[in-house]
Image (cartoon, rainbow, N blue to C red):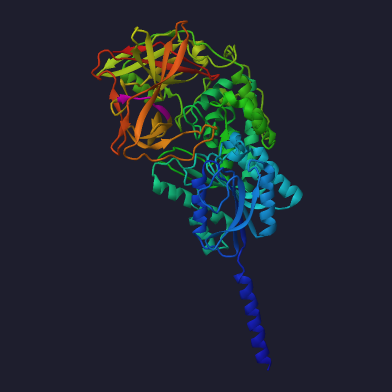
Amino acid sequence: MKKLVLILLTALMLLGISSVASAETTTTVMVYMCGTDLQEDCLNDIYEMLAVQVPDSINIVVEAGGASQWSDGNLEAQAINRFIVRDGEMQDLEVINQYNMGDYATLQEFIEYSAANYPADRYGLILWNHGGGSTGGICYDETADDDFLSLMDINYALYCVTEETMKGFHFDFIGCDACLMGTFEMASLSRFYADYYIASEELEPGWGWYYTYWLEALASNPDMPTEELLRNIADGFYDYCISQNPQEYLTISVLDLKRFELVWQRAEEYASYLSAAIADGRMTDISRARSKMYAFGSYYEHSSDMVDMEQFARLTKSFAPNAADKLLAAIDRAVIYNRYNEDMFDYACGISILLPKDTRGEFSNYIEDYEGNEYTPNYTDFVKGYMATVSGGSYQFTSATPSRVEYSQVIGSALSGSGVQTAFIPGASYEPEDEESGEEYEETDEQEPAEEEETTESEPEQTGDGETEGGDAQGEISAYDENNMYAYSMTLSDEDIANLSYVEGMLLLSIDDNENEPYYVDLGYLQNAWIDWESNTVYSTFDGTWPYLAGQPIVMYDQVKTEKARRSIIPVTVNDNECYLLVIFSGDSKTGKIMGMSEGYTQNGLPVRGSTPLKNGDVIVPRYALYYDDENGETQEAAFTGDEIVYDESLQVTYESITDDGDSETTFLYSFCLNDVFGGWQLSDHISFE
């Protein structure tokens, strides 16, 4: 009898142990999907969710709205559709009218609803839509005049949930399936509300995250640790996008927000040194460093001004080397998983940070929201001080001494490092004018910025209110022809070089109207210039060739160059729609592959997700800017278009000689575009080729 009881007790104990062991981790993922003009991409991601048979322990709660129309009849336009993903269906919960997804209260209410109705052991929040970085925010509702969630809105919504209505509530992870949201500022606020953060530094392709991949992984192992789940999200996104386009510009990273606390501390300490440098008149060095930083999501007329945080620290570390190294070490620990296309980027640490340059004209529009978050006070003060100095000055280049150099000397200078390539080159080294500047800000254990020792360096004269566009610098350019290879140099005065930030090469096509009045067609800017700071000399590696498309010289702007590739854009119309061709040059190749087309930024200023492949038969027309003087001698600009080009897969961009086009009446003008440290620019005198 005792033996039987013992057997029964043992069986019950085993059953109890089995019951405990089989209890799955419950997970509720809240997906806040603002459709806007991305309805098809939004629906594709919903369908990817529906493709997975998720167990009852996993709740995928979706709020889809912000769209004026849907192509799926299950979703109501001009409203918010709230449903869960279950058994391959959108199981409706409710439809809510007159809600603005760009309002913090809408996000707050969705979180509260999801947590109250679907309690779980683990919670995740995904924000889905256009993303605009730390100044642009996310979730633009086209039914509410494109109102959006600023970082301040997100912070307030999360604060209200975790500190007021549901005090103590905490997310296991927060993620953004959107462009440009892998930022220091977004991670800084997220650290109060979550354990992990996942997002992309760069623009995301239209495919976005691959929901089927990571939901299948979670469904097969509901007890999967959160870090492993986020690695699956990153891998699914990266691998799928690369399978569609191996040359896609991709980044995605996972941050451990407990470790990120040290990143925040180090960045705030480092910012105090940079503010001290600004106060001591060292804005010039920071401006020159900024010119070498690629801004994620940039197009010719638009930019996020979000730069890679690691590159930012490396290119400015001369002000406080020890503090910069501590910041870099903290970044390395906090970014626990990072994937980026190494063929397209030399670096992408996983975190971007705001450093204004291209958006300086809109700074007053976004600084209020930016500083309103109050979670990065020292860094915000640095940004404000830097922009106040930049916008408060201007410079007019005055003179240059002609010089004539051998083409081999230009290349030799570049290879030796005495010449520094001047812009948008990831990984480029940067040395300030004063080699002792790294010692001027003494670092202490308390990380208090020390005062700079007095120097004899002359201060740049600051006058006017900013840009000095147009006008010609009064120097001459020398040209040297060696085996049909052209090289230019221009020597600047000490004052000019002290106010120079970077240089680009510009080509104009000169044409005449019936009255022989000169007209000039802008063919764009290329990053083919070098500066020798020791000799005050600007060099160009322009070799007499320029990009052509189907026999037409075209406008082309370099975006980013790495050791393996260069990405450039060409303004065109495709089937009468204004857009850009995206072109990839592998290595030093003179032949570029057309990867697709993109609108760049929408008419509402939103960065477009990804690019669209071209189809055989698409009609391409190159776009140009035409300059001429009116009867009053005022320079005017007009649109100008080239000849139609019918696309087929063999179409490529090729560099061709501008001196061998067979038209003796064709005149090209090449010049340096001198960009000053305040953000203005001027053109030098031209060299003409007939």
User: Which image quadrant is residue 445 in?
Assistant: top right
Mark yes or no: residue 272 visible: no
In the image, residue 100 above or below residue 170: above
Which residue is at a point 52% across and 26% down the rendered structure image?
Answer: 289
Q: Which quadrant of the figure contains the C terminus?
A: top left
In the image, residue 303 above or below residue 75: above
Which residue is at a point 63% across and 21% down the rendered structure image?
Answer: 388
Q: Which quadrant of the figure contains the N terminus?
A: bottom right
Q: Measured from the top left, where is residue 669 in percent x and y?
A: 35, 14
Q: Measured from the top left, where is residue 192 in percent x and y?
A: 68, 46
Choose between 376 and 446: the one closer to the eye.
Answer: 376
In magenta segment, residue 554:
yes
Mark yes or no: residue 75 visible: yes
User: Which image quadrant is residue 145 in?
Assistant: top right
Would you say 389 lies left or right of 206 here? right
Choose between 459 and 385: the one closer to the eye.
Answer: 385
Q: Which residues are magenta?
A: 552-558
Q: How many numbered discs sit on the rendered protein?
A: 0
Choose between 474 and 288: the one closer to the eye.
Answer: 474
In the image, residue 164 above or below residue 465: below
